[in-house]
């Protein structure tokens, strides 16, 4: 049986019985969601990374310590991911490496806990993490541009116009790179920029 055949077999629905109807519904719900939301599915199997000693030291294990079969399995998986077309979040940006890692961690955490993982919840967590990263980047751009201003300026209006332009540019960068439901992060970025304004107004005077 190939890995894809194994996956197909695992996604078969369980026929409910009078004594076990609720369990069958819960069992089938996850599989129905996988079939519905992931029309293209590929399964990868991984051999054990190594013997017991390697497994106990996985956090610090070097590549040379891992089994050749595990490394081959990993290489095949990475090759598939890198060659696949970019996935996109709904009405938003392509899924980059950081978002993919967040999604993967959410799925693994839910699977380990034995819960039925919610795809929407996983995407919400990944989106919030990505927006936070983009917000920090926008704030850094804002700070760098403020630092580049030549002070003092003779006119308050001149500084105010430059300040608003810098704020607009940094928020535009965030807007282009953010994910849906980013309003809260825009507010946080604006509040940071406002906190920096009194300092530069003082320098200007």
Image: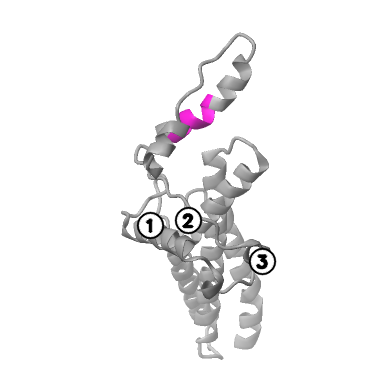
Q: CA distance from mark 2 to mark 1?
A: 10 Å
Q: Is residue 37 visible?
A: no
- Residue identifier under label 2: 100
x 48%, y 56%: residue: 100
Viewer-closest of 11 and 163: 11
x, y percentage for residue 61?
Answer: 60, 71
Badges 2 and 1: C-beta atoms under 8 Å apart?
yes
Q: Residues within 10 Å of mark 1 (few under 14, many from 20)?
A: few
Q: CA distance from mark 3 to mark 2?
A: 30 Å
Secondary structure of the magenta portion, mostly? helix
Badges 3 and 1: C-beta atoms under 8 Å apart?
no
Give the extent of the magenta segment: 28-34
Secondary structure under tag 3 reads helix
> In the picture shown, does residue 147 fall above or below 2?
below
- Residue identifier under label 3: 53
Task: Tell us which disc is closer to us: 3 or 1.
Answer: 3
x 37%, y 42%: residue: 2
Badges 3 and 2: C-beta atoms under 8 Å apart?
no
């Amino acid at each position: 049986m190939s890995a894809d055949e194994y996956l197909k077999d695992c996604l078969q629905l369980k026929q409910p019985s009078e004594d076990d109807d609720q369990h069958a519904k819960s069992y089938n719900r996850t599989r129905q969601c996988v079939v519905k939301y992931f029309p293209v599915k590929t399964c990868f199997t991984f051999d054990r990374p190594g013997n017991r000693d390697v497994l106990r030291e996985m956090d610090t294990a070097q590549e040379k310590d891992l089994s050749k079969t595990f490394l081959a399995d990993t290489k095949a998986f990475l090759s598939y991911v890198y060659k696949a077309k970019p996935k996109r979040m709904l009405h938003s940006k392509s899924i980059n490496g950081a978002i993919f890692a967040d999604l993967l961690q959410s799925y693994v955490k839910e699977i380990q806990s034995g819960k039925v993982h919610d795809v929407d919840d996983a995407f919400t967590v990944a989106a919030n993490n990505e927006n936070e990263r983009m917000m920090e980047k926008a704030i850094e751009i804002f700070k760098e541009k403020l630092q580049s201003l030549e002070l003092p300026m003779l006119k308050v209006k001149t500084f105010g116009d430059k300040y608003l332009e810098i704020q607009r540019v940094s928020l535009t960068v965030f807007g282009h790179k953010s994910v849906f439901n980013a309003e809260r992060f825009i507010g946080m970025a604006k509040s940071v920029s406002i906190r920096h304004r009194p300092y530069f107004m003082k320098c200007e005077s």
